[in-house]
Image (cartoon, helix red, strand yellow):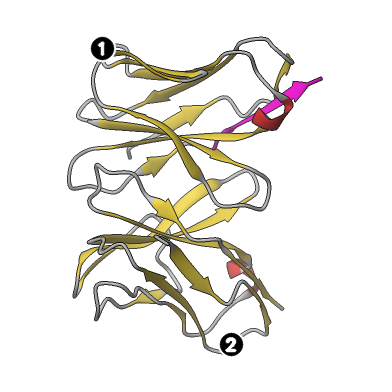
Amino acid sequence: QKEVEQNSGPLSVPEGAIASLNCTYSDRGSQSFFWYRQYSGKSPELIMFIYSNGDKEDGRFTAQLNKASQYVSLLIRDSQPSDSATYLCAVNQAGTALIFGKGTTLSVSS
Amino acid sequence: EAQVTQNPRYLITVTGKKLTVTCSQNMNHEYMSWYRQDPGLGLRQIYYSMNVEVTDKGDVPEGYKVSRKEKRNFPLILESPSPNQTSLYFCASSFGTNNEQFFGPGTRLTVL
């Protein structure tokens, strides 16, 4: 059974701080890694995707992938109250279904 | 506008009354999928489809049916709904399993 694990949180950070969200996965053959943000009652929306080891930056967001450790993370710099949401990690292998973690709830206080 | 649409958005029904939740995408995506989301359980895949006439079970397919007769549509059918199917349902589509999935707005289903 392929698994994607996330700490459910809540992760609480003050406004302006760096939020670090972590995700581990069980399938060593996984090739694609996604971070989605979901506001309460809304549909998930893509924040970042990463395919290769290392860091990928997009604005205030940085995704980090370490395939040897089967670990992917999302850093949010200069966190804002509007970043308060649940963040879903999703992982898949080519030709197979995307597997989602249960999500980490982030709360950014002003 | 590129989008995934679902209907209805909200539905309250009774046990055993067949229902269909429609899903349509206008992005020419080959891959479509249905998820249910429950508190503490996250997003769980019900069924997915790699292309027209190709469907496969996800993690929680019991009590659900799907069909993919056209590329753009992927309806979810509950032949005899039960209260444990009360949930928030999302349809999603993408070009392939390695690509970003676009989600519909969700359907909140309550089965009494």
- Judge whether B99 appears above or below A28 on screen: below
Q: Residue at point 58% right, 87% down?
A: B16
* Kind of residue indicated by mark 1: Ala
Residue in front for this viewpoint, B99 or A100: B99
Residue B103 pos. (x, y %): 45, 55
A42 lies above or below A33:
below
Left or right: A75 in relation to B1: right
Say if the magenta span includes residue A8.
no
Amino acid under label 2? Gly
Q: Secondary structure at mark 2?
A: loop
Q: Which residue is mark 2?
A: B16
Q: Which residue is mark 1?
A: A68
Report x, y in % for residue A99: 37, 42
Q: Position of residue A73 (x, y in %)?
A: 44, 18
- The answer to which image quadrant residue A58 occupies is top left
- What residue is rendered at 69% in x and 22% in y? A80
Magenta run includes residue A104: yes
Residue shown at 22% from the left, 61% from the top: B30
Q: Which residues are magenta?
A: A102-110
Q: CA distance from mark 1 to mark 2?
A: 49 Å
Tag in front: 1 or 2: 1
The secondary structure making up most of the magenta span is strand
Give left or right: position of B2 versus B98.
Answer: right
Instruction: Left or right? Give the position of A73 relative to A25.
Output: right
